[in-house]
């Protein structure tokens, strides 16, 4: 499948997943229905959220969170510059303006709550708290900041399903007013394309549920089961439904998620131990963060941009795939959102980091191959 000796991510699809999708196809019901409902039930229990509403992508989840939060033109939404672009596109879909904010630093790539606080203005309405690479952001600090200023907290959990915000094991996505999750094929719980909104608020949950399917008061599945064929349309909605084959796949994979995150964590522990002695390489995040993270990716830091680029190209020559995340304001579309004075921590992280291969199916030989290649490149 891949020309890489060690690809960035590798997705294992065991027979039971294939069987679950085949069963769904053979059932003859393909759009949102009983399997989607079962998937939502299981997700709600797994994350411990009262309302888990599946949608067609993580981006759709963020968009619906912004709509249900009542964000609109003239509003400002604070978004970290170190993230994937969808964190900032979602507020823009509803006409709000993203206000980019800095990261904590090379030791923790997540949003700096103190910098977020400095960027609050009378127009600020929300903060998008991204849990980057699976490592939980300072959720409690963000919650307190939002409460103090009457702001909505949207947690972008696209990279962090299963990450924990405290020692009580509370999951990301449950402290914000909304948690937005992704089931994209590179994420920890992958089905190809898919997402979910988590919220504890019944009214907001109802609104998200309504808006994901054209704001219609009944679903195709309801009508198929003989419910009233008439329906009303009560708002401007979207088609953001998840379909049944993906729900079946998600439900099958959810049963192994805990174990699969634990395998990623074991690989990260091994990487950290074996890479620590290598001069020229810095490893972000501390042990506590490692234990709480659900490990979407394993980032490391090099001395500067030139050295990072050399490191990546030499690893590539060795068959090791890597990636990195530009800061949002380095993109053409987002340059105009760069604040005066820039975002020094975000820029340093963007210049210096790259992510090494990480997936739940990585074996010892692959870890060896990566560690040996890194050691050789930095020797
Ligand atoms: C992947 C991702 C998204 C978007 O999820 P999709 O399912 O791909 O739409 C949003 N935010 C972050 C931080 C992501 O990594």
Image (spheres, rainbow, N blue to C red):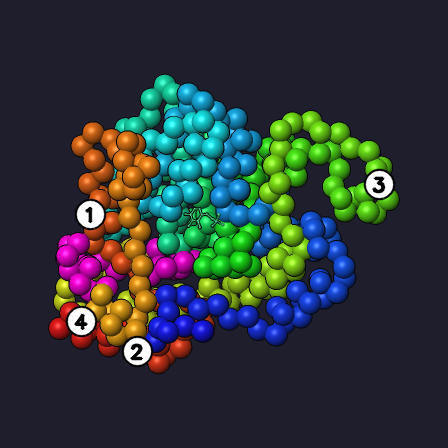
Q: CA distance from mark 4 to mark 2?
A: 14 Å
Q: Nearer the viewer, mark 3 or mark 2?
A: 3
Residue 27 visible in the current orientation = yes
Give residue 274's position: percent from left, percent from top. 25, 72
Q: Residue at x 53, y 42 (%)?
A: 60
Count of numbered circles on the image: 4
- CA gap, disc 4 and disc 3: 65 Å
Whichever of labels 2 and 1 marks the residue nearer the N terminus, that label is 1
Q: Which residue is mark 3?
A: 227
Disc number for residue 368 = 2
Give the Cα separation between the discs numbered 1 and 4: 22 Å
Residue beneath disc 1: 348
The residue tagged 4 is 377
Q: Position of residue 228 (x, y in %)?
A: 85, 37
Mark 3: secondary structure: loop
Precedes in sequence: disc 3 or disc 2: 3
Q: Quadrant of the C terminus?
A: bottom left
Q: CA distance from mark 2 to mark 1?
A: 29 Å
């Amino acid at each position: 499948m891949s020309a890489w000796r060690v690809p960035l991510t590798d997705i294992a699809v065991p027979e039971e997943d294939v069987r679950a999708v085949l069963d769904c196809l053979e059932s003859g019901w393909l759009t949102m229905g009983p399997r989607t409902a079962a998937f939502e039930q299981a997700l709600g229990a797994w994350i411990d959220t009262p309302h888990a509403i599946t949608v067609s992508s993580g981006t759709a989840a963020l968009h619906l969170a912004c709509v249900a939060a009542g964000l609109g033109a003239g509003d400002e939404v604070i978004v970290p510059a170190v993230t994937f672009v969808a964190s900032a596109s979602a507020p823009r879909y509803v006409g709000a303006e993203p206000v980019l904010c800095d990261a904590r630093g090379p030791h923790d790539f997540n949003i700096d709550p103190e910098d977020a606080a400095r960027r609050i203005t009378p127009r600020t309405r929300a903060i998008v708290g991204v849990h980057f690479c699976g490592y939980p952001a300072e959720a409690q600090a963000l919650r307190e900041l939002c409460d103090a200023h009457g702001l909505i907290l949207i947690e972008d959990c696209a990279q962090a399903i299963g990450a924990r915000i405290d020692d009580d094991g509370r999951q990301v996505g449950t402290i914000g007013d909304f948690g937005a999750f992704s089931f994209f094929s590179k994420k920890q719980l992958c089905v190809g394309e898919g997402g979910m909104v988590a919220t504890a608020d019944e009214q907001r949950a109802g609104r998200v549920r309504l808006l994901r399917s054209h704001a219609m008061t009944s679903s195709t599945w309801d009508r198929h089961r003989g419910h009233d064929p008439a329906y009303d349309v009560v708002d401007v909605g979207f088609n953001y439904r998840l379909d049944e084959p993906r729900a079946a796949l998600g439900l099958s994979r959810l049963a192994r998620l805990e174990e699969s995150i634990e395998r990623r964590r074991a690989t990260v522990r091994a990487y950290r131990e074996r890479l620590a002695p290598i001069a020229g390489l810095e490893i972000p995040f501390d042990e506590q963060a490692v234990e709480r993270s659900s490990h979407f990716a394993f980032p490391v830091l090099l001395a500067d941009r030139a050295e990072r680029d050399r490191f990546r190209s030499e690893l590539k020559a060795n068959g090791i795939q890597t990636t990195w995340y530009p800061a949002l304001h380095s993109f053409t579309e987002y340059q105009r959102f760069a604040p005066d004075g820039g975002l020094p921590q975000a820029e340093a992280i963007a210049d210096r980091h790259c992510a090494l291969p990480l997936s739940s199916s990585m074996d010892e030989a692959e870890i060896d191959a990566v560690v040996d290649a890194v050691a050789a490149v930095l020797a």
